[in-house]
Amino acid sequence: MKYEKLIIAKSENNLLRDLLNKVFSKDAVHQDCYNRLRGELINATVVEEADMPKDVVRLNSLIDVETPFGYIEGYQLVLPKDSNPTAKKLSILTPMGSALIGYAQGDKVVWSFPKGEETITIKKVYSEKEKVS
C-alpha cells in the first residue's frame, strides 16, 4: 500500500458513510464488501479536497486496473445512480468499486468477489480532463 491507510476526501467520506448506512444486501459477497469498506473508512485518513493526492482513487476517478480477468482501461468509479457497466461506469457499491476507493496507483488490493478473493492492481488513476488531453 503506497500510503499507510486509505485516503478519502472529507466530502466523499461523509457521502460513503451515508450510502453504507442505507444499503443492505442479501448477497453475502456484497454484504462482506460493504462491511469491509465500513471498517476501512473507520481507519482512513480523511483530508480536505485540496489535500487529496492525485493518484488516489476517488469518486469519478478514471482507473486502469489489472485483474485476474484481464486488463481493464478507463473504468470510472461513480455513485450507484450513475452506474452503467456498458459505459464502464462502476458503482462504488460493487465489489470492485468498494475495493478500489481510497487506494493509490500502484496498490495491489485483495478483495472478495463472487468467485472468492482476488487481487486487483491499480495501474493508473486519472481524471476525465486527463483522459481528454
Image (tube, rainbow, N blue to C red):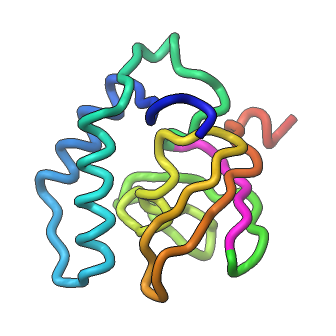
Residue 69 pos. (x, y %): 69, 81
Q: Report the side of 127 relative to 32 (left or right).
A: right
**Who's the residue at 73% across and 55% down the image?**
64
* For residue 120, above or below residue 20: below
* For residue 5, above or below residue 79: above
Residue 41 pos. (x, y %): 30, 39
Nearer-the-camera pick, 58 or 40: 40
**Who's the residue at 66% across and 32% down the image?**
55
Nearer-the-camera pick, 39 or 94: 39
Nearer-the-camera pick, 109 or 11: 109
Nearer-the-camera pick, 68 or 86: 68
| Quarter of the image where the N terminus is located | top right
Give residue 72's quadrant in the image: bottom right
Part of the protein shown in magenta: 60-67
**Who's the residue at 59% across and 42% down the image?**
61
* For residue 83, above or below residue 133: below
**Residue 116 part of the magenta segment:** no
| Quarter of the image where the C terminus is located | top right
Q: Report the side of 93 relative to 77 (left or right).
A: left
**Residue 62 part of the magenta segment:** yes
Secondary structure predominantly adopted by residues drawn in magenta = strand
Residue 28 pos. (x, y %): 24, 81
Residue 47 pos. (x, y %): 40, 17
Q: Report the side of 112 relative to 104 (left or right).
A: left
Q: Report the side of 32 relative to 91 (left or right).
A: left
